[in-house]
Amino acid sequence: MLDKKHKLRVLLLQIRNEQKVRCEELASFARHTGLHVSQIDVLNVFDTPDFPIHSAETYDALFVGGASEASVLEPENYSFLTPSQNLLRHCVESDIPVFASCFGFQLATVALGGKILRDERDFEMGTIPIQLTGSATSDPLLCDTPDPFLAVSVHRERAVRAPAGCQPLAYTSACCHAFRVTDKPFWAFQFHPEVDRATLVERLTIYKHKYTESDDQLQSVLDSAAETPESHRLLAKFVERILIR
């Protein structure tokens, strides 16, 4: 099994323009999957906004990261949205395993016919308790996850429900937080399984102008932040239970 893990090759669809966050996100996916950074190739949509739907076909899986510099609700401003959604639909049709986080969740929701809403204020930010649906008890990734569990969640856009043809797996009072495309190796999470407390502190400090109204609000969120180990384990489970087995 260890030999199989070392041979895995994954593509990260990255939606990051800030150089420091680009590097940190790649390192975070590597750390929590247990893969070496060299096993993950990056397709950054700010550098390459147009790419073919078969971009992930030579890989064992596709990861999709978050974004603080784009919106799925503004296709007129971000030309990479259509190629990204086409890629995700192709992965569904071709049974290419997908693990999508935060903005990746929103991309997948729109690509699969769901609806995304925008919150101008009072949006989820920090480490929050996530609850599981009944479907999670038989899900390969969430079946042994405590209910509830803590996860990092920072987003101004959300989906109230999972798209048609998908199994809702986790939620808060505000939104759907995880779904799987039925009978496909495709998972999407509104929260950030790849982000730990230290990374949350670093990212919110970088993007404080986007998510917080004052330094006091930022400090309050950071002071209440907790570690989120069960959330991180989902990435390792994806590698071990889906990609290797």
Image (cartoon, rainbow, N blue to C red):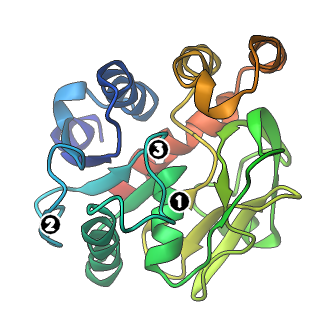
Q: Is residue 59 visible?
A: yes
The kind of residue on which mark 3 rests is Gly
For residue 10, side relative to residue 213 (left or right): left
Write down the residue under mark 2: 57
**Observer-nearest of 114 and 189:** 114
Image height of 188 relative to 67, above or below: below
The kind of residue on which mark 2 rests is Glu
Write down the residue under mark 3: 66
Q: Secondary structure at mark 2?
A: loop
* Image quadrant where residue 163 sits: bottom right
Q: Earlier in the sequence, mark 1 or mark 3?
A: 3
Q: Quadrant of the N terminus?
A: top left
Q: Residue at x 16, y 28 (%)?
A: 38
* Image quadrant where residue 58 sits: bottom left
Residue 51 appears at what percent x and percent y?
13, 63
Q: Residue at x 31, y 31 (%)?
A: 35
Residue 210 appears at what percent x and percent y?
60, 33
Residue 201 appears at what percent x and percent y?
62, 15
For residue 93, side relative to residue 198 (left or right): left
Write down the residue under mark 1: 105
